[in-house]
Image (cartoon, rainbow, N blue to C red):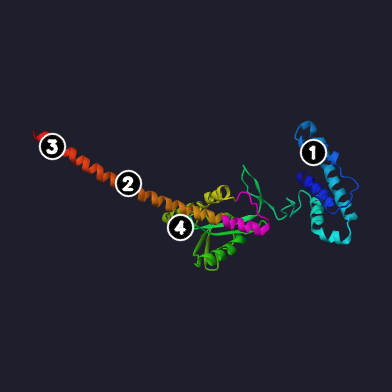
Amino acid sequence: MKLYCKNIDRCLELSKDESLPLRRSYTRELKSLKLKVRFMNHPKRKKEGFKAKKRMQTIAKALVNDLERKMNSSQRLRHLDNLLLYSSVLTQKRTDKHKVYSLHEPEVQCIAKGKEAKQYEFGNKSSIAKTKTGIIVGAMAFKGNPFDGHTLPHQIEQIKRLCGMEIQSALVDRGYRGKKHIGETRVEIPGAGKVSDTYYQKQKARKKFRQRAGIEPVIGHLKQDHRMMRNYLKGTVGDAINTMMAAAGYNLKHWLNKVIFALDLIYRILTAEVQYFLTGNLNRQIFISAGGECEK
């Protein structure tokens, strides 16, 4: 419904910019239709709401067709991408692939999370890599919704380019099933392990993959504290810039926290030494006077 409204608004703006007189603007009818769609969740108004939604789609199609008829060749060539986008929004169905979810960002994809609280996210897929100490060494944004295992070679290549080091092993979750080795890097995925593994080997693998789970709160901090939850930059290039800036901000905050902790520790040590020096002399004086009283 929102896409139909935006489609109609875009068509009206386009006709105004190009000075194209439309056959009808549907302004008054749209006002009543929006009210009907707004309250369509009520059981008695569902049928009326679906009819209003269908009518809005018909109006949007009529406006797009009216614009295409009245445009000359130069205008049609200039606004060809927009007209194709509007037509694809109006003709797409629920079961179609590569649907358009936003007019101002057609590259947005629907990503299934599989969680009860939030089943879907709309945006692009990003990959984050961190070390054992918590430093982010790789951050990439990918166009669309690729398979997680297909993003791993590009992520490893970025880490090599930025850090200049070879990666011996990469600990990933079960979404990266597929290849066991990428170049010289060993891909390790949590699992039940072999039957022949000893108790020590199982506990070692369990501890290793529990450390891997530490990247989940890092992703949460990137979303909540470093503006990865919503991206205000345009296009896929803006997605890549936003991901890199969020990772850089996280690393900078991590470094500043360590500096503040070190300065606070130095301050505490210095103040403790001064207090010890003062209270030590005071205690010594009290001890001597008390000893003198005991001697008497």
Of tags 2 and 4, the one toward the viewer is 2
Q: CA distance from mark 3 to mark 4?
A: 68 Å
Image position of 39 (left or right of 23): left
Q: Residue furthest left?
A: 296
**Residue drawn at (45%, 51%) of the image:** 257
Question: Which is nearer the N-term, disc 3 or disc 1?
Answer: 1
Residue that mark 1 sits on: 34
* Residue 192 seen in this snapshot: no
| Front residue of this view, candidates 83 and 98 | 83
**Residue drawn at (55%, 56%) of the image:** 247
Residue that mark 3 sits on: 291
Of tags 1 and 2, the one toward the viewer is 2
Q: CA distance from mark 3 to mark 1?
A: 93 Å
The tag on residue 246 is none
Residue that mark 2 sits on: 271
Q: CA distance from mark 3 to mark 2?
A: 30 Å
Q: Whole-percent x and y of residue 25? A: 87, 44
- In the picture, the quarter occupied by the N terminus is top right
Q: Secondary structure at mark 3?
A: helix
